[in-house]
């Protein structure tokens, strides 16, 4: 028998004893509770004299009512001290036989993990602890499974992700991180609304997997007898709204990509995607820097933010560097010298094979093509080899916020080309802490060029995937205004702003391999 089974049997015994007291062990509506933090904040230590016509407040007149989970319990006979935790923090509750009278029998049956309500006089102990001296006790939910052994919470990482419902109350810093995540998203919404953007919703299930180069999840609609794709990006639908006359739109919602899991990748993730008519990628750069800088000011202690073993300097202005310049800086190769680039990539395969293999395992969006086979390099398109070299030599050096601008046009089928040099596209990616956090374009709005780019993109794709979004081309033929588009990965942004080591630390219920319950 497992230890958890033994504990459950013991706790069920107490559950029956609670019922024998004619007490509902699963409570009901509970009125008048304040948060622990609010109670401690309003506590007045000592009498307050009358002033400005106010009635004097005596120390013994302070009352408090709180509901939460028992995370610490010390039974010292006729006195029980409980640490009660709600989502704002903790407060101590004192239970005494004298004050509780008939409810003392219930008090003696309480265990760690139980959820209770406690109301009574607010005061301080001899050690200076703010305490609710309860004269009324309510059992709101009996816990049948024991909490983590240590008051400081779950330590097993995998168990924390699987049992987030325990992790949230066992580890206070986890609760705070997810409260901060919610606040960050709310702040982003308010920021964009103040800029005149309209929040919209676009389909999660789509007939064509479009808007990004990624492998989709496929599902089937029984009534229509047709396959559908969970969206990999909302891009093509948001652009349709530009055609319809919505000039500033944004969406914060889920994308789904049927690819690997890693510290930076979860198959289901949250994206902010927005489009602004009559703008370009320079406007998007300014907007991105303004959004994230405002978040740093509000949610971080300073512009110097610790992230893992890195210290990220968010001081403005942020660096803006061309793709080709960074490739030269970190790989030593000129972007136009494809012979030297191919040779350098082969060196990486030979000298840093483990690095290449790890990149392939964790790659999501960019679908890195390097493999441990030199002959395959010779058969790859130039732009693919160039981008592989960029990923392996440049990205790991971009710690402070860096806008990588002007990507090779062949990598960007939805992006307008540079007028100065059509070999490059007006696109940027923002890297922070060695991670890509944002991606933006000057959007392509020429239907003829877009259709040809789609045809080129579809070559070599799986037959089931090789479908052009003809309706999007039709929309462009009606006329889409010149525009800038931007996507920001919310999960990665929250990682950086909260110092989380893994994307799983900022996703409430990350995808995990099915647990083998037979073990």
Image: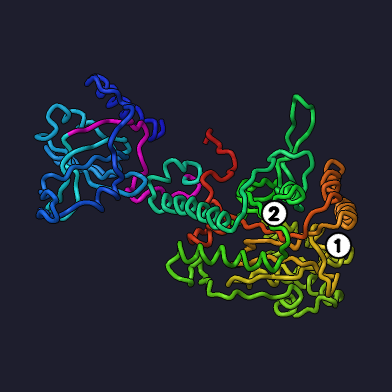
Looking at the rendered image, the disc whose residue lies closer to the viewer, 1 or 2, is 2
First in sequence: mark 1 vs mark 2: 2
* Label placed on residue 376: 1
In the visual, does 343 lie left or right of 7? right
Q: Position of residue 95 (x, y in %)?
A: 17, 38
Instruction: Label the magenta part by its dominant secondary structure.
Output: loop
Residue 8 image offset from top left, x and y in percent: 36, 30
Mark on residue 247? Answer: 2
Dot 2: what SS? loop
- In front of the other: 157 or 60: 60
Magenta residue check for 489? no
Which percent across, then down, holds residue 56? 10, 50
Vertical relation: 308 (above or below) 142: below
The stretch in magenta equals 136-159
Residue 498 in percent (x, y) is at: 48, 60
Q: Is residue 141 magenta?
A: yes
Of residues 4 and 260, the one nearer the viewer is 260
């Amino acid at each position: 028998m497992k230890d958890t089974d033994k504990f459950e049997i013991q706790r069920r015994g107490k559950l029956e004893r609670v019922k024998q007291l004619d007490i509902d062990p699963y409570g009901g509506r509970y009125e008048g509770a304040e948060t622990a933090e609010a109670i401690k904040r309003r506590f007045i230590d000592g009498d307050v004299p009358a002033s400005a016509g106010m009635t004097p407040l005596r120390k013994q007149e302070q009352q408090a009512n709180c509901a939460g989970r028992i995370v610490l319990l010390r039974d010292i006979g006729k006195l029980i001290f409980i640490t009660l935790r709600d989502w704002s923090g903790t407060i101590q509750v004192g239970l005494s036989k004298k004050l509780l009278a008939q409810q003392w029998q219930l008090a003696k049956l309480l265990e760690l993990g139980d959820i209770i309500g406690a109301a009574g006089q607010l005061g301080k102990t001899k050690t200076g602890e703010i305490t609710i001296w309860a004269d009324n006790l309510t059992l709101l939910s009996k816990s049948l499974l024991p909490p983590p052994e240590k008051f400081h919470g779950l330590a097993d990482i995998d168990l924390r992700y699987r049992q987030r419902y325990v992790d949230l109350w066992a580890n206070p810093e986890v609760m705070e991180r997810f409260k901060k995540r919610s606040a960050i998203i709310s702040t982003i919404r308010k920021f964009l609304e103040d800029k005149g953007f309209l929040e919209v919703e676009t389909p999660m299930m789509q007939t064509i997997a479009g808007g990004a180069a990624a492998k989709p999840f496929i599902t089937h609609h029984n009534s229509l007898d047709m396959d559908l794709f969970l969206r990999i990006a909302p891009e093509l639908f948001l652009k349709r709204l530009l055609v319809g006359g919505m000039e500033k739109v944004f969406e914060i919602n889920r994308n789904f990509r049927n690819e690997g899991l890693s510290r930076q990748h979860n198959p289901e993730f949250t994206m902010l995607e927005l489009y602004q008519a009559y703008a370009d990628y320079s406007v998007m750069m300014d907007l991105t820097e303004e959004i994230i800088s405002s978040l740093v000011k509000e949610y971080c202690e300073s512009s110097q933010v610790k992230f893992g073993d890195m210290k990220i300097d968010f001081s403005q202005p942020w660096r803006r560097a061309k793709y080709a310049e960074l490739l030269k800086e970190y790989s030593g190769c000129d972007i136009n010298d494809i012979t030297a680039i191919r040779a350098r990539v082969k060196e990486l395969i030979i000298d840093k094979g483990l690095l290449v293999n790890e990149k392939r395992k964790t790659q999501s969006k960019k679908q890195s093509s390097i493999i441990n086979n030199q002959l395959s390099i010779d058969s790859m398109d130039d732009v693919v080899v160039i981008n592989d070299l960029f990923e392996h030599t440049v990205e790991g050096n971009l710690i402070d916020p860096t806008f990588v601008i002007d990507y090779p046009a062949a990598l960007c089928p939805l992006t307008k080309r540079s007028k100065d040099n059509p070999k490059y596209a007006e696109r940027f990616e923002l890297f922070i802490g060695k991670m890509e956090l944002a991606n933006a374009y000057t959007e392509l709005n020429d239907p003829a060029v877009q259709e040809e780019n789609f045809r080129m993109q579809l070559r070599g794709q799986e037959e089931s995937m090789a479908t052009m979004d003809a309706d999007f081309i039709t929309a462009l033929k009606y006329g889409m205004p010149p525009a800038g588009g931007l996507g920001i990965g919310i999960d990665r942004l929250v990682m950086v702003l909260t110092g989380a080591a893994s994307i799983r630390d900022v996703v409430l219920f990350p995808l995990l391999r099915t647990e083998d319950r037979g073990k």
